[in-house]
Image (cartoon, rainbow, N blue to C red):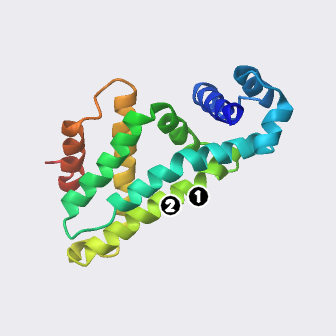
Amino acid sequence: MENRDNLLKCALDLFTLNGYDAVGVQTICDAAGITKPTLYHYFGSKSGLLNTLLAEELNPFLAQLESAANYRHDITDTLYQVAQTYFNFGRQKPHLYRFYLSMWFAPHDSEAFKAMQPFNDRQQSLLENLFAAAALDHGNMQGRQRTYAASFLGMINTYVMLALNGFSELDEDFVRRLLHQFMHGIFS
């Protein structure tokens, strides 16, 4: 398992620095100090490596997000828990978060985008379900769950990237500023 874990770590580092498409199998193998047959033994291909990396790294995050997005009849607190989940993820795994966002904006037909799409869809679905549940308590939100989910997720990702690029910190104050801006709009 040491070779397998080393391959995953080296691949993530290389993908983050150079982008998925720019990194070849040989480059990953050289960085990990193993041969191509070892990579193929564990993952079958470069895309198999990517899919394994995403599943192992993002599924635990999505489980935390699912718990945080469980609407408890307090929209502000629930959105706070969701934002905090993303901020924690950004703090704990900054390279993965950066790579995840790069794939989100990858060309639509690329391997990277296709590998990330189920994870993007899952996040959007969790947030849409949150806003749909909240609409039962807040009638003015009805029918807007898709837009609210996309907008909130976009704001979260922007705030996390601001922090990862050194413009702020992923701290309590930043979470509260994000919530304030989302809940009250840009004219608050």
Q: Does residue 132 appear to the left or right of 101 in the view shown?
A: left
Residue drawn at (67%, 42%), measured in percent from left and top? 50
Q: Label 2 belongs to which residue?
A: 122
For residue 178, above or below residue 123: above
Dividing the picture into quadrants, the one containing residue 9 is top right
Taking depth in this image into account, of 139 and 60 the one nearest to the observer is 60
Identify the disc placed on residue 160: none
Identify the disc placed on residue 118: 1
Q: Secondary structure at mark 2?
A: helix
Residue drawn at (34%, 73%), measured in percent from left and top? 132
Badge 2 density bin: few <14, some 14–19, many ≥20, Cα 10 Å: some
Residue that sits furthest to the front in the current view: 1
Mark count = 2
Which quadrant would the N terminus be assigned to in this image? top right
Q: Residue 35: x and y, percent?
A: 83, 27
Q: Does residue 175 appear to the left or right of 67 in the view shown?
A: left
